[in-house]
Image: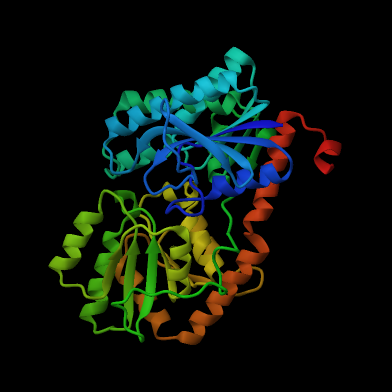
Amino acid sequence: MRLLYLHQHYSGPEGATATRAHAMARALAARGHEVTVACGRYEGARTGLDGPFRRGLREGRVAGFRVVEFDIPCSNAQGLAARTGAFLHYARRAARLAMGGGFDLALASSTPLTVALPALAAKRLRGLPFVFEIRDPWPELPRALSEARLGGGVPGPVLAAMDRLATAACRGASAVIGLTEGMAETAIARGANPARVHVVPNGCDLDLFGPHVSRWRPPEVAPWEVLAVYAGAHGRANGLDTAIDAATILRNIGERRVRIVLVGEGSERARLIEEAARRDLRNVTFLDPLPKPWVAALLSGAAIGLHLLAPVPAFAEWTAPNKLMDYLAAGLPVVTNAPGRAARLVEAGDDGAACGLAAPPGDATALADALAALAADPARRTAMGAAARGRAVRLWDRRLHAARLCDVLEEAAGVSPLARAA
């Protein structure tokens, strides 16, 4: 089939952001499908294209599939108006591509939710079927963040428009893919046919992350320090003040083994750096966003993976952080302060072995206690890390999930089972 993959924030493995779309597109191409990924210029992303933009785009082949990159910059540091403009500009350019590209199927991967606009337009005007993928449920999450006063207060009319668009996408899609069961439930609540709603979670890149990767540690780190690494966005939704508070507690109780390393970018980063400096926290290190191979090397040299979110109840089942999968693949014990799905992932599984600890949301003392407990017990860290890597291999290998996504798309496009087998 000829597939148009609408993913505004696509990045290849050399970027500093999520690579799910790259893995899925590569798996589809390996099955013999003609894949076109349409994306914009997302901060931290690297598409693999380096030629000049002409008439607002550049294109080329990457890892067996075609990438069309529109010259539309977008980043989390932009204000609501600028991001909205980037979303709508991308939707317009992608709609033109969808109308004239001779595709058999479109995959619209949200966020942003506006990727549904070109898919809906092409279905209405050209009869192009589409699959809607929910990587973050919008407007459910923006509404929850606004209610918690963590998202900048999305205006009511914007949320109402997003409601209508999300409902249209869920009802108009030939199939809906959610990254978690909770996301899938939001699609069913919007009227999607339950028989056409599927869960294809984030998975682990076992080649990029793991014990085979050479270790790297920042030069200021002492050999005896236990590194607890958070690699991800530094926004209000991520709740990194809890990490700063936990570092303060550890310093005050004389726990000198733990160093918290915060890697990434976001609207809160400058303030967090200033606050750590004001408190004279010498047990906290901030690193700029790193390409995925460098993150893999840093995790190889770390002892704990930190998964942190602000205490928002909606996060319990409506988030699927890539960083958590990266930690498991790297064989790191995980400390999370997110309840629900994340906490279940690190709890003891069928093998009876836990691969981390869960602290209550927003509880800096509990977070500090968990870090101190793991720092003091190397054998426990080793056992949890082995359990994490084992679970990554058995349950979360991204290649297994890519195969499942291919099956869903082929069924939606009407590709016969015999053709799939061939």
Please state the horizontal and vertical placement of residue 151, each as a whole percent of the image: 30, 41
Relative to the observer, which residue lies in front, 270 or 43?
A: 43
Residue 106, placed above or below residue 355? above
* Quarter of the rendering occupied by the N terminus: top right
Apparent side of residue 28 relative to residue 242 in the rendered image (left or right): right
Rendered location of residue 400, percent (x, y):
68, 54
Horizontal side of residue 52 vs 386, given as left or right: left
Residue 357 showing in the rendered view: no
Closer to us: 286 or 26: 26
Q: 34 or 5: nearer the eye?
A: 34
Residue at screen point 16% across, 67% down: 277
- Residue 340: x and y in percent read 49, 56
Q: The C terminus is located in which quarter?
A: top right
Residue found 31% across the figure and 79% down from its top = 221
Location of residue 259 in the rendering, given as x and y in whole percent from the top left corner: 32, 75
Residue 305 in view, yes or no: yes
State which quadrant residue 271 falls in. bottom left
Please give the name of the residue rendered at 70% of the width and 48% of the height, measured from the top-left corner.
403
**Left or right: where does residue 237 sit relative to residue 169?**
left
